[in-house]
Image (cartoon, rainbow, N blue to C red):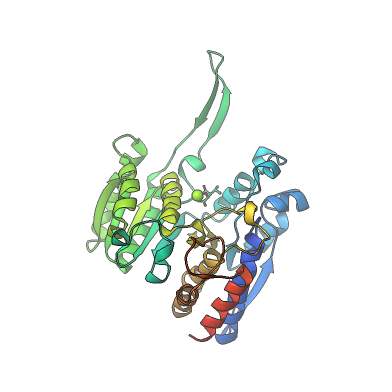
């Protein structure tokens, strides 16, 4: 029997309550497959700072180092709580970016998937959604502006200034582009390359590297699109996209727009892959305003389990079953209050939603 160690970082806000539902799914998958998951919970995020003095404590690092894969809930506190933490210890800068850097998780996969069962959540008109939206945004996750040199000071004119460096080398660009091409090859063989080469030199190099490696993927058609235009196309004609590839900040922004297309970031799980380790997380924040109320939907957290099963453990069929189970619960007419749009769905709690997913999964 295969045994996998999984680090469980529940995080802040709604993190612990949606993670509880994800754990139920791990347990059921374990029950009905020849696999065992050793689930190791560890503190991470804003609360970890208050409890342990660091948002990414040493004990958590050790657990993550030893794990086969990591699943992480959202992190972050309310504005007021965040202000009590020194800037560099705030969970985004003090925990999340260091987690990404530690495991070099350069390849971030964010599915924007709107099958029929959840199409009613989208704010887009039915004629735009058509038969459903199903794309994956591939975002470079450990380079560019978010990781570049930062400097603040006072300049010669006595004005405060800030400098943040956007830097990529061709190796960093090539490896994420290869991920995009390989995924496109497995899907519809169309790759949308998102860039801003009319202004940014980083995009000029990006496109040069793309031109050099594209011949290795002769069956993939590349469509070049400026990032600002891509934002418009995502609203007007989202079904043209299948795989999109882009640098870190473009991916941060457009993937949130992906959540907007679905009707909620709560429907956005993600996978972050490095050369040796992968971690999985919802793309949304910790929603402190609704934390502890039992009204948050666990879709993004359970979807992250599905992505782990597929991408870390090769359990493709079981991953498909998990997706189908979640969508099945929506199709049966249930939802949670956070996602409701005054529709006809019967509103149930986070916990009840998780139980229904497990029940559905059992029947598949
Ligand atoms: C995301 C988030 C993070 C990012 C924040 C929390 C640092 O917005 O995963 O998209 O900007 O990458
Ligand atoms: Mg983001």
- Which residue does the image show at 48% across and 72% down from the upper left? 330
Please say if 277 is above or below 93.
below
Quarter holding residue 168: top left
Residue in the foreground of this view, choosing between 6 and 23: 23
Quarter holding residue 118: bottom left
Please say if 16 is above or below 46.
below
Residue 12: x and y in percent read 66, 55
Residue in the foreground of this view, choosing between 172 and 118: 118
Q: Residue furthest top?
A: 157
Residue in the foreground of this view, choosing between 313 and 125: 125
Residue in the foreground of this view, choosing between 308 and 325: 325
Does 200 sit left or right of 71 as displayed? left
Q: Quadrant of the N terminus?
A: bottom right
Is any part of residue 339 visible from this angle? yes
Is any part of residue 7 visible from this angle? no
- Which residue does the image show at 49% across and 56% down from the upper left? 265
Residue 98: x and y in percent read 60, 49
- Which residue does the image show at 59% across and 64% down from the upper left? 70
């Amino acid at each position: 029997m295969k045994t996998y160690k999984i680090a469980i970082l529940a995080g802040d806000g709604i993190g612990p309550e949606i993670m509880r539902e994800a754990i139920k799914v791990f347990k059921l998958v374990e029950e009905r497959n020849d696999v065992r998951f050793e689930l190791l919970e560890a503190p991470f995020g804003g609360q970890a700072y208050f409890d342990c003095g660091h948002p990414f404590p040493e004990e958590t690092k050790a657990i993550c180092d030893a794990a086969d894969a990591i699943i992480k809930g959202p992190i972050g506190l309310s504005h007021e709580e965040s202000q009590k933490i020194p800037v560099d210890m705030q969970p985004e800068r003090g925990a999340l970016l260091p987690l990404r850097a530690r495991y070099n998780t350069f390849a971030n996969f964010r599915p924007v998937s709107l099958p029929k069962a959840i199409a009613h959540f989208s704010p887009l008109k039915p004629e735009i959604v058509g038969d459903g939206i199903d794309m994956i945004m591939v975002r470079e996750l450990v380079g560019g502006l978010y990781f570049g040199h930062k400097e603040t000071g006072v300049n010669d004119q006595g004005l405060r200034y800030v400098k943040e460096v956007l830097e990529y080398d061709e190796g960093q660009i090539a490896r994420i582009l290869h991920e995009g091409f390989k995924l496109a090859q497995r899907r519809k063989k169309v790759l949308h390359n998102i860039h801003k080469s009319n202004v940014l030199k980083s995009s000029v190099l990006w496109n040069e590297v793309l031109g050099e490696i594209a011949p290795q993927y002769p069956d993939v058609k590349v469509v070049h699109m400026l990032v600002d235009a891509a934002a418009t196309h995502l609203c007007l004609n989202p079904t043209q996209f299948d795989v999109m590839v882009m640098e870190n900040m473009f991916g941060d922004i457009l993937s949130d727009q992906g959540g907007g297309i679905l009707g909620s970031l709560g429907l956005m799980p993600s996978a972050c892959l490095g050369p040796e380790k992968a971690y999985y997380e919802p793309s949304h924040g910790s929603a402190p305003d609704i934390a502890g109320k039992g009204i948050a939907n666990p879709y993004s957290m359970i979807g992250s389990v599905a992505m782990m099963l597929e991408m870390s453990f090769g359990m493709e069929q079981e991953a498909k079953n998990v997706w189908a189970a979640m969508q099945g619960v929506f199709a049966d007419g249930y939802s949670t209050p956070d996602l409701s749009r005054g529709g006809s769905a019967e509103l149930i709690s986070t916990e009840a939603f998780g139980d229904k997913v497990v029940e559905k999964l059992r029947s598949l």
